[in-house]
Image (tube, grey):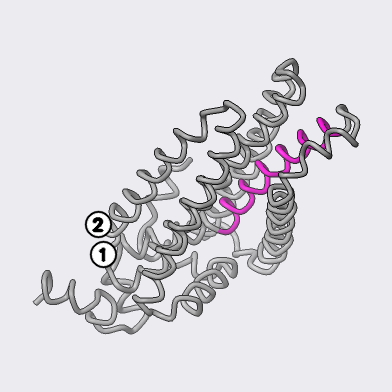
Amino acid sequence: MGIKLLNATFDQSTNLIKDKDILRQENKMVKDLKGNPLRISLSMIILTLVLWVGLGFISIVFYANEIYFFHIVFWIWSILWISGIFINRKIIKYKSLVPYRFTINVNNFCMMIFFTIVVALIIFYSVITDYNSNNIVCITITLGTLTSTIILINKIKNLKLTLFNKINSNGSSESYISKILDKFMTFSVIFLIIALVFSDTANDLIGNMNSKTLSIFLIISIFLFIVAIAIYEIHIVFPYILMGYYKNKYPEEYRKLEGQTQIEWYGEKYFNKYIT
């Protein structure tokens, strides 16, 4: 299923341009970055600081409660984050593909934070239930994973139909669905960020809230967060990165299609080193 999705010809890959969600994301990235290298570099520095401060805070909180897992995660995520930035620069070299490289870096950042929050919720749930209900957590993660898999299979099917032109691209309905899913993702993230910001009052919540009610609240949070991550990755990031994959695979064809000069497409540094 996945192999065929990556083997389209240039002509077939241009069918992705019909996808309104890809165009919306592409226009957003171009508008946000505006091709400014300094803006991109500053964004990476800010995200790095946020990653370190956020993970450092979580690590300290759990370390104080004799849970050392996040102390290790802090260093693993930091190494992977910095390595990912340099690896992406090596793989994606063309100036015109900088928005895709930036998207991958930001996505890696988000996945690290999301994974950390989900694990924090699971550990918090395990602690308040005295580790007696971990099977419920496993069931929740399994249901979240199955739901995410169904969403992924459906999206791959739609992308393949669009790529190989088996049906007309259903841009309007897909865009409408993605807007709804995007809102769902946003509200889920805001909900969980608020919960983390007020994590200092967790003991008061436990004291005032029935333990069973709090457990249900956490289980629902874990499930919604897993599904929200999957929706964002599958409906927003994945199609956009797929478009970038084909632009990287057929650079000259897309350069001519978009009417750019070689310097505009590849960048002056790459042009001087590899083309002239």
> Number of marks in the image?
2
Residue 204, picture quadrant? top right
Residue plotted at (63% across, 38% down)? 118
Residue 235, picture quadrant? bottom right
List x then y, in percent, for residue 142.
Answer: 66, 28
Range covered by the magenta-colored residues: 214-236
Mark drawn on residue 20: none
Q: Name the quadrant of the C terminus.
A: bottom left
In the image, taking residue 145 as reference, residue 180 lies left or right, namely right
Q: Which one is in front, 203 or 163? A: 203
Q: Are marks 1 and 2 in contact (CB under 8 Å)?
A: yes
Circle 1 Cα neighbour tier, 10 Å, few/some/many (<14 / 14–19 / ≥20): some
Q: Which residue is mark 1?
A: 93
Up the image or down, 271 lies above or below 220; here it is: below
Query: Which residue, as the protein is rendered here, is positioned at the far top?
Result: 132
In the image, taking residue 164 as reference, residue 121 lies left or right, namely right
| Main secondary structure found in the magenta portion | helix
Up the image or down, 56 lies above or below 250; here it is: above
Q: Which residue is mark 2?
A: 90
List x then y, in percent, for residue 231.
Answer: 64, 50
What residue type is disc 1 on? Lys
List x then y, in percent, for residue 40.
Answer: 39, 71
Q: Which one is in front, 246 or 219? A: 219
What residue type is disc 2 on? Lys
In the image, taking residue 165 as reference, residue 272 lies left or right, namely left
How far apart marks 1 and 2 lie (CA) works out to 6 Å
Q: Which one is in front, 147 or 129? A: 129
Q: Which one is in front, 165 or 245? A: 245
Query: Which residue, as the protein is rendered here, is positioned at the far left?
Result: 276
Up the image or down, 222 lies above or below 44; here it is: above
